[in-house]
Image: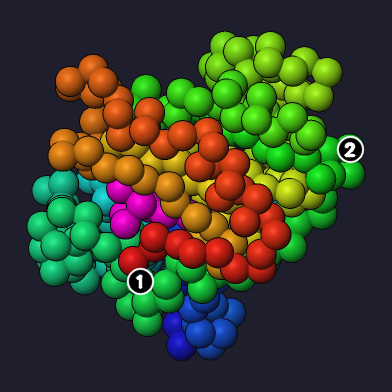
Amino acid sequence: MNSSIVLLPNWIGDMLLALSMVMRLPESRRSKTTLLVPEQMSSLVGMLCDLPRIVYSRKNAESRRGSVTAVRNGGFETIYLLPFSFSSAWFAMKSGVPVRRGVSREMRRFLLTDPLKKDAVNCNNAKLHHITHEYAAILDMTFCPPEEWSGIRVERDRNHAGSIVYCPGASYGPAKKWPHFPALALLQEADRIVILGSREDGESAREIKSMAPERITDLTGKTSLREVAAIMSGARAVISNDSGLMHLAGYIGTPVIGLFGSTSPVWTCPLGKRSMAMYLPEPCSPCFDKTCRYNHYRCLGNITPEAVREAMDNASASSAIPSLCN
């Protein structure tokens, strides 16, 4: 079989969901597969899988040319485009790979040699099934349900082993930010808690830490993605908004409670047998908006800290917990 290269998505959550499908390709195909990885995630991908990779850099014209040259010199027969953007298809055409397979959207049909009709892949963009269905179709492989993912081994950070990890951030917007993390910290009075996220999540972290500063460690803005993975690997459980960090926890197999508001767990529930999506939809949800058009955010607010604590206790005590993945 001729060799192929897979362009992974730019967002960390989508990238990890896509990577879980690539890693479940039949060995006869996986052994001939190279990853084209967005530059900011190359180190993390190197930690999470053993496939060869080429860095996809787009910082400037020179770096883009370097990425094109690296792919062209690889002699690949097929490139699978997991992102849906026009720019990814344009890059594939410039690289000269003969077979370019991806979903026909974003006016890129003329750049693809093996286009998939978007309606056949994603049900008219209704998001009625998990996004990994689309990745499986693009990769031309049998679909593997996200809840069957077993996780991968990552060396754990011993400094925070046994802690509960909170991920209160969501770069998408406030419609994905659960408001009850501080109340949950008070309920989990016997636990050590580590807060992970970006520097922009610092305000949320400080509010949580003020509940019990002696047993809460704020690491927002202080860790790389590799360090985050190591901390999560040793955690009892991870409690997270629907974000890239939620998907990282699921990918490495740590019990994770994913909190959903404006988005849908049917579309992007976390990976793994020990993952659970909590979702109490309103008539207006899922809207997939960044902010609530009605300014009530009830889809998130109605998920109580007591319910999350109970779900987390069940998750960390069981080898498998119920999932809303479809």
Q: Residue at x 54, y 57 (%)?
A: 275
Q: Confirm whether the magenta stretch covers residue 138.
A: no
Q: Confirm whether the magenta stretch covers residue 267.
A: yes
Question: Between marks 1 and 2, how big is the CA–CA gap?
Answer: 38 Å
Q: Which residues are magenta?
A: 264-270
Q: Residue at x 72, y 21 (%)?
A: 218
Q: In this rendering, would 56 be left or right of 154?
A: left
Q: Which residue is mark 1?
A: 136
**Residue type of the residue flagged with mark 2:** Asn
Mark 1 or 2, closer to the camera: 2
Dot 1: element:
helix
Quarter of the rendering occupied by the C terminus: bottom left
Mark identifier at residue 159? 2
Image location (x, y in percent) of residue 250: 57, 55
Q: In this rendering, would 211 be left or right of 201?
A: right
Where is 157 relative to 206, above or below?
A: below
